[in-house]
């Protein structure tokens, strides 16, 4: 194994060493644990920085408050408090051992054994810890697995999964993010054996894992592996389109755009609007997420051949994000080359054109003699349709002509129409 990289800057100065010094007194030790350690070893930003300590929660809280920090008891029953230092929250958890588990949660007792605490974690690459002096503690070969692109459960894989069935999805998420090659066989076998336990998980936990998985670096191949063993269909409740994620990722890379979890989920599981409805229920999607998926299911079947006017009409109707959602999924599902200039031009329309404000109001039509009510709305709709088809003009003479045409088409006499005249539009 090569030498360790230099200690991370966030460990040498700033909030983290201040917090470690405040808690690590009276014989108690404090270390950085989990993802921040893993990411430091492979040169990634730390993400959330979590700490573990031999100090019990009451002592952690008292010492943090004494140092002038704010304390939030976010998970005190399980030994976790959040300490806020200069606006940033750090989870600080007392070392623990599991007394009992039921597949969703654990009953724990506090301890002082660092290896026993690490043993209750899921994967070897998540069980490493780092002292304030920069010493790495790796009890289960996590550093070697990280270097080799392996994601393995600690100890017996089946036991690990039975302790928390969410680890089934976490296995695939971490594999898609940190691993190379095939999913670890022992881990995969355990996940298949315990797949029925997925039904016991909350929809919110499922959503959180899926949304992270679909944007992971190797999401496409990993989702295909999940589909091949029947796990993905069980989570989504339908037939997954795992290849669609790979195709979308290729288009994203060509266009230098970041992966969006809603678009990735759409590429995986939304062909029609009913798919969006199903996903909303199975994954407890937010209203905003559902509306985006619903819009994609309704309108992704379009391409540059529909013409610029039709593209502008869509952009006007659904806004820039809705437009990009539909067009990007349409592009990814087309047979076009990822560098296709027509698709690229279509996707860039929101950057080149902003729809003007509709220049006709109901008040204006009332001044022309139309009464308020359904008749007025029908005429406004006819005018808007003509206005969009004419490429969104703003000049008064052009708009006026469109109004007169629509009024005449709807059975009115333009400026001289009378209240109560029956519309034929």
Image (tube, rainbow, N blue to C red):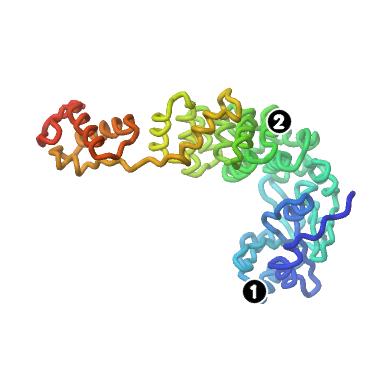
Answer with left or right where residue 23 lies relative to residue 383: right
Residue 325 % position (x, y): 50, 36
Mark 1 element type: helix
Dots 1, 2 in contact, CB < 8 A:
no
Mark 2 element type: helix
Q: Quadrant of residue 404?
A: top left
Q: Nearer the viewer, residue 54 or 141?
A: 141
Q: Residue at x 13, y 38 (%)?
A: 369
Residue 29 % position (x, y): 79, 67
Residue assigned mark 1: 65
Quadrant holding the C terminus: top left
Q: Is residue 111 visible?
A: yes
Q: Mark 1 and mark 2: span between their CA atoms?
A: 48 Å
Answer with left or right where residue 318 lies relative to residue 72: left
Mark 1 neighbour class, 10 Å CA radius: few under 14, some 14 to 19, many 20 or more: some
Residue assigned mark 2: 225
Q: Residue at x 18, y 26 (%)?
A: 424
Answer with left or right where residue 245 lies relative to residue 376: right
Q: Nearer the viewer, residue 202 or 313?
A: 313
As displayed, is residue 103 above or below residue 393? below
């Amino acid at each position: 194994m090569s030498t360790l990289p230099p200690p991370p800057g966030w460990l040498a100065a700033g909030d983290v060493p201040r917090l470690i010094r405040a808690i690590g007194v009276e014989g108690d030790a404090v270390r950085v644990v989990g993802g921040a350690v893993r990411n430091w070893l492979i040169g990634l930003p730390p993400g959330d920085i979590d700490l573990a300590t031999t100090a019990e929660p009451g002592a952690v809280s008292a010492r943090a408050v004494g140092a002038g920090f704010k304390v939030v008891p976010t998970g005190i029953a399980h030994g976790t408090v959040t300490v806020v230092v200069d606006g940033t929250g750090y989870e600080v958890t007392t070392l623990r051992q599991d007394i009992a588990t039921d597949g969703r949660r654990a009953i724990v007792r506090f301890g002082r054994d660092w290896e026993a605490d690490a043993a209750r974690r899921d994967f070897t690459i998540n069980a490493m810890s780092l002292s304030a002096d920069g010493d790495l503690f790796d009890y289960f070969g996590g550093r070697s697995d990280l270097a080799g692109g392996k994601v393995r459960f600690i100890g017996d894989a089946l036991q690990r999964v039975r302790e928390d069935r969410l680890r089934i999805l976490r296995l695939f998420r971490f594999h898609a993010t940190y691993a190379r090659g095939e999913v670890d066989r022992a881990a995969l076998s355990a996940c298949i054996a315990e797949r029925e336990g997925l039904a016991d998980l909350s929809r919110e936990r499922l959503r959180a894992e899926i949304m992270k998985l679909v944007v992971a670096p190797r999401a496409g191949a990993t989702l295909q592996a999940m589909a091949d063993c029947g796990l993905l269909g069980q989570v989504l409740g339908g037939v997954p389109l795992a290849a669609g994620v790979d195709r979308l990722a290729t288009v994203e890379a060509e266009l230098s755009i970041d992966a969006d979890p809603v678009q990735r989920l759409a590429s995986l599981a939304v062909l029609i609007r009913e798919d969006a409805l199903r996903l909303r229920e199975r994954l407890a999607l937010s209203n905003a997420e559902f509306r985006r998926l619903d819009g994609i299911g309704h309108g992704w079947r379009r391409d540059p051949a529909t013409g610029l006017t039709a593209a502008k009409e869509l952009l006007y109707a659904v806004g820039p994000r809705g437009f990009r959602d539909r067009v990007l999924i349409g592009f990814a599902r087309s047979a076009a080359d990822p560098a296709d200039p027509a698709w690229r031009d279509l996707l860039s329309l929101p950057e080149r054109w902003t729809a003007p404000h509709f220049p006709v109001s109901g008040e204006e039509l009332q001044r022309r003699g139309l009464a308020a009510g359904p008749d007025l709305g029908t005429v406004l709709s006819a005018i808007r349709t003509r206005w969009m088809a004419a490429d969104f003009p703003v000049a008064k003479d052009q708009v006026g002509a469109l109004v007169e045409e629509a009024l005449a088409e709807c059975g009115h006499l333009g400026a001289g129409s009378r209240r109560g005249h029956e519309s034929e539009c």
